[in-house]
Amino acid sequence: MKIILLTHQRELDRKSNTGQLVIDVLGFAASRIIWDRVNPDGALLSLIQQAKVGLLFPELESSEKGEGGQPRQVCIGENNKAALAEFEHLVIIDATWQEARKIYNRSAYLHSLTKVNLSHSIKSSFRLRRNQIDGGLCTAECVGLLLAYAGQAPLADELMTHWGTFNLEGRNNKA
């Protein structure tokens, strides 16, 4: 499973951005695409057409579900980790929660993707940003949990170790 970070331009300059940490630790297993509302990334659009791509996103409201009321979503948790095997790529919107919602709403190509949401009882310990949504995790926490669910515990542990240091110090040792 490859992680694709669909990153808001503003994230690149934020010292609190955990997406870069994901890129650094995962190497070729992760990539970053800068979101553009007017000109969607052609390679991403092609990948969506060809491959099994999911979008990590909170649970959909009933008004957002697929035809016939069937949800276009899957909940990944301890009891159904195998469901991750259905995806070759997972897109994660790397932005603030407010920006992520705007990116989703303004990117019709994301609406067709199966939404993957994480079932967890973890309380985020992300301390470098305010106004976090209840039950929300930062990008690095999400990827760490996904890796653990996918049976990649050593890589998940490595990411979370680096994330723990980052969470205390911020990028470039500045919060």
Image: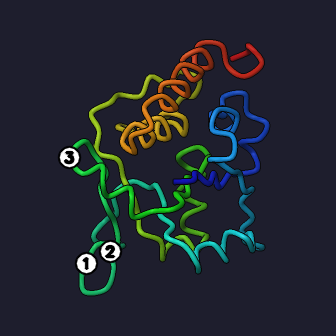
Q: Quadrant location of the C terminus?
A: top right
Q: Dot 1: within a 10 Å radius of its alpha carbon, few (fewer than 14), some, or many (20 or more) residues?
A: few
Q: Crowding at label 2, few (<14), some or many (≥20) Cα neighbours within 10 Å?
A: some
What residue is drawn where x is 20% and y is 46%?
79
Image coordinates of residue 126 in percent, x first then y, are 50, 25
What residue lies at 72% left-to-right and 22% top-to-bottom? Answer: 171
Figure check: 82 above or below 45: above
Q: CA distance from mark 1 to mark 2?
A: 6 Å
Task: Please rate how many residues cluster around mark 3, counting C-alpha atoms within 10 Å: few if below 14, some from 14 to 19, many from 20.
Answer: few
Dot 3: what SS?
A: helix
Placement of 148 over or under 10, stated as above or below: above
> Quick check: 27 left or right of 138?
right
Is 48 above or below relative to 5? Answer: below
The circle on residue 65 is: 2
Q: Nearer the viewer, mark 1 or mark 2?
A: 1
Q: Nearer the viewer, mark 2 or mark 3?
A: 3
Instruction: State how the image is colored.
Output: rainbow
Q: Amino acid at mark 3?
A: Asn
Question: Residue at label 3?
Answer: 79
Q: Which residue is mark 1?
A: 70
